[in-house]
Image (spheres, grey):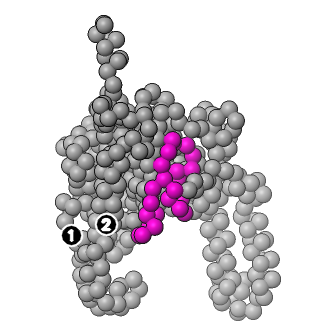
Amino acid sequence: MAADDMARAQPKPLRVFILAGQSNMEGHARIETFAFIGDDPATAPLLKRMRGADGKPTICDHVWISYFTGGGESNGEGFGKLTAGYGSRQKPNEDGGKIGPEFTFGLMLDEQLKEPVLIIKTAWGGKSLHTDFRPPTAGPYVLSDWQKENYPKQEGHGIPKDFEKWKADKIKETGVYYRLMIEHVKRVLADPQRVCPVYDPAAGYEISGFVWLQGWNDMVDGHTYPNRGKPGRFEQYSDCLAHFVRDVRRDLSAPKMPFVIGVMGVGGAKAGNDILEFRKAMAAPALLPEFKGNVTAVPTAPFWSEELGAIEDNRGKVRQMGYYLDSKHKDHANADGSMTDEQKREYLRKYEGDLISPAEVALWNRGASNAGYHYLGCAKTFALMGKAFADAILNMPDGSK
């Protein structure tokens, strides 16, 4: 047999990719927003990949997924061939009708690798890196100077009433979701054939990449990260994320595993200073000499829908006006609190009509399905993120091989 024929006949290890994070890694884009992707000539070809000839979501030929999610005792696993529906789920083993970045991430791998792939996804909403996903070598949660000064005073406004109990609870909570993530990955890899029927034990498996998409709970935590508006506010996040990269590589015995950081993109090009500062902190570990060439920061702001974001801004103004009308406010229509409920509704209908046109309402219903902190639940955004993450991993050393 010729050498090249022998090489082709040699069984290849199963390629394993790990996705982890909080609610945006879960994914809150409803499948009903897929059509919006086709409205843009630049992304219409991507939609064709996401749908089969029957118009239903594509089912990958060579990609399987194990998705571990839930909350507390309701944590559980859904698994099978990758298709749409492995986004956020009320019940871990039931199709949630949504996608996160995993769908197009897997589609790209399916197209480019043309060999069996296993994706292991672990994601839970509302989880921080500073506590929930805190990696072992980052040490215990460290109080900020602001917390040390203010928490013992027990003044309310987010300050715990029982500071000693809060500290004890913090110790219990620290690293819980990091450990759940590692435990699930190891559980799947102890018997890959359970999830991926074509797994060949003789060939084994190879962990070929890791994608991290998280950040909201850290970004909005003004107690852990005080000094709003100041440069370097989130340096602690950068340090913790660098420990996270080192620790997952050590705990999964994959010392040079390609690692992608999905950098917070909420707000797009018009994001405020604190979001911009957080983006810098998220991307910082990729600049460390020790991670050169095998850790990449992928900005997700370019995938934010600016047109839907502008509509959401006006929707926010309508919601704010609703709050004003429900209480006396000297600068608004219900200054003396005398408006009836019907008068409030009529005023709000007119106010909304002046801000948001019927065409914009239709566009919103076509492209968005969730709040701004979930990238507006826009499938176009999540589809572009997943593709970018796959491209980044496959273009790193040891990513495509």
Highlighted range, magenta: 69-93
The residue at 47%/37% (across/down) is 63
Q: Position of residue 369 (x, y in %)?
A: 63, 57
The quadrant the C terminus occupies is top left
64 in magenta: no
Between residues 202 and 151, which one lies in front from this camera angle?
202
Instruction: Check disc 1 and report the residue beneath it.
Output: 140
For residue 176, the mark is: 2
Q: Amino acid at mark 1?
A: Pro
Mark 1, residues whose alpha carbon is within 10 Å: few (<14), some, or many (≥20)? Answer: some
Is 341 placed left or right of 215 in the picture?
A: right
Choose between 235 and 13: the one closer to the eye. Answer: 13
Please report the residue visible at 24 percent of the width from the left and 42 percent of the height from the top: 254
Q: Amino acid at mark 2?
A: Val
Residue 110 placement (x, y as % from top left)? 48, 32
Tell me if residue 291 comes above or below residue 229 in the rendering: above
Quarter the N terminus occupies: top left
First in sequence, mark 1 or 2: give its number.
1
For the view shown, which residue lies furthest in the top direction?
2
Q: Which residue is drawn at the image coordinates 28% and 86% (left, top)? A: 165
Residue drawn at (74%, 71%), measured in percent from left and top? 351
Is residue 215 visible in the rendered structure shown here? yes
Q: Residue 187 appears at what percent x and percent y?
A: 33, 52
Compared across the picture, whether 112 is left or right of 210 comes to: right
Single out the mark in the foreground, 1 or 2. 2
For residue 114, above or below residue 278: above
Q: Secondary structure at mark 2?
A: helix
Q: 249 or 306, which lies in front?
A: 249
Residue 17 visible, this angle: no
Element type at marker 1?
loop
Looking at the image, residue 85 lies above or below residue 81: below
